Image: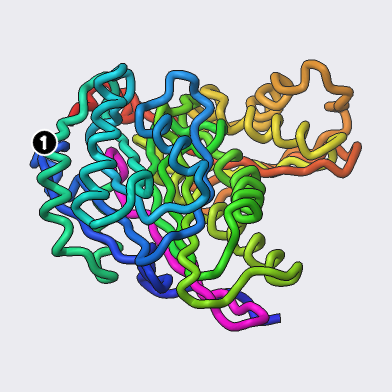
Amino acid sequence: MILPRKIENGGVTVPEGFTAGAVYAGIKSYKSYKPDVAVLLSDRPAACAALFTTNRFCAAPVTLGREIAAGGYVRGIVINSGNANAGTGEPGMAAAREVEAYAEQVFGLEPGSILVSSTGVIGEQLPVCKMRSALDQIRPRMSRAEGSQAAWAIMTTDRRRKEGAWELPLSGGTVRLGIMAKGSGMIHPNMATTLCFITTDAVMEPGPMKAMLKKACDESFHALTVDGDTSTNDSLIMLASGASGIAVDNPADEAAMEELLETVLAEMARRIAADGEGAQKTLTVAVKGLADKEEARRVARSICRSNSVKAAFGHGGLSKALVLSAAGAAMADSSGDFSKVECELTKDDEDVFVHLDFHEGSGEAQAYGCDLTGEYVRINGDYRT
């Protein structure tokens, strides 16, 4: 079997059929020296699969996104950083719809074909005039070379761009997959936990693609926690342009694509944990030997989100006792026997790996997190655009 190949310096515009553009529009303060509005387009209707936040206090673009993504096919996404358009009521919903409609007008697309995604400060109205101006400026810049600029534009408190691309050999030929994501704070396992956009030039149907995406998300982003907060804007969106002409339409190809998605999203989850607000170290927790996968998942996540664990880990004082205490908090109704458990802490530079084995069943799972530092408090206390 030929394995996927990672493409050096690749991103969301590596797959055929996709272009991007990004500009600074003044949504974020200029001191950031970075673009703050991006557009990602497919040159044809792209199959769309999307997962959104489970936070009931969700942002206007999430509400609009659910509506548009339900149609199964879209032409692209407008993304801004610096303003989440959350907690903005009816004016916020009107603003999201206006940005969508104006983007469709600027790019000559049919109504209901553009998704809108926002991230940043909540509770402030989205400056639609600045968004319209940005779209006018982006139109002549759209190209495959702008993919990394788009990945830069969607960042808020992130310190590093998060992007990548892979080639995947299938029975009918080779397809490509690209990704970009932002995530640093308000990261917790409740649906997507970040903004993440995936592209592929494979021919795929929306239904099967969403099933693959959900399974991959369960094994990656749902296993990630930075601070225990689920954002109002979490969105994970995958677009398949079909520009390669190569279909994912048999069990072997579907399994290969599903495995690649799981690998890519797991890598991205670890990169988001490493870039957590104020984080200096990453924490990976592997739990096995419990009754089932769900119980193992609860325990692994409980350890990763424990403030005691995170603070001690950050200051070099993490102990097996603290780890087991956090595990026990997730096992109130469990028959798990702590007299049998093996707990091992291993270090790789500054990062720590926790391995727990209860020796009772076949359930196993992983979770990803980071340390908790005083810098996290400063960033969130001061965060404004």
In this view, 238 is above or below 84: below
Stretch in magenta: 155-177
Q: Is residue 261 left or right of residue 250?
A: left
Disc 1 marks which residue?
Answer: 129
Q: Is residue 266 left or right of residue 252?
A: left
- Of residue 332 and residue 172, the one placed in the foreground of this image is 172
- Of residue 332 and residue 353, the one placed in the foreground of this image is 332
Rendered-image quadrant of the N terminus: bottom right
Give coordinates of residue 206: x percent, y percent.
58, 53
Give coordinates of residue 294: x percent, y percent.
76, 34
Residue extending farthest front: 110
What is the count of numbered marks?
A: 1
> Which element is circle 1 on?
helix
Q: Is residue 317 left or right of residue 383?
A: right
Please report the residue visible at 49 percent of the width from the left and 20 percent of the height from the top: 56
Please report the residue visible at 14 percent of the width from the left and 47 percent of the height from the top: 134
Dominant secondary structure of the residues highlighted in magenta in the image? strand
In this view, 212 is above or below 174: above
Amino acid type indicated by mark 1 = Cys
Please report the residue visible at 11 percent of the width from the left and 36 percent of the height from the top: 129
Regarding residue 349, the answer to whether it shows in the image is no
Regarding residue 333, the answer to whether it shows in the image is yes
Rendered-image quadrant of the C terminus: top left
Q: Is residue 25 covered in magenta? A: no
Give coordinates of residue 110: x percent, y percent.
33, 51
In this view, 345 is above or below 145: above
Please report the residue visible at 14 percent of the width from the left and 42 percent of the height from the top: 132
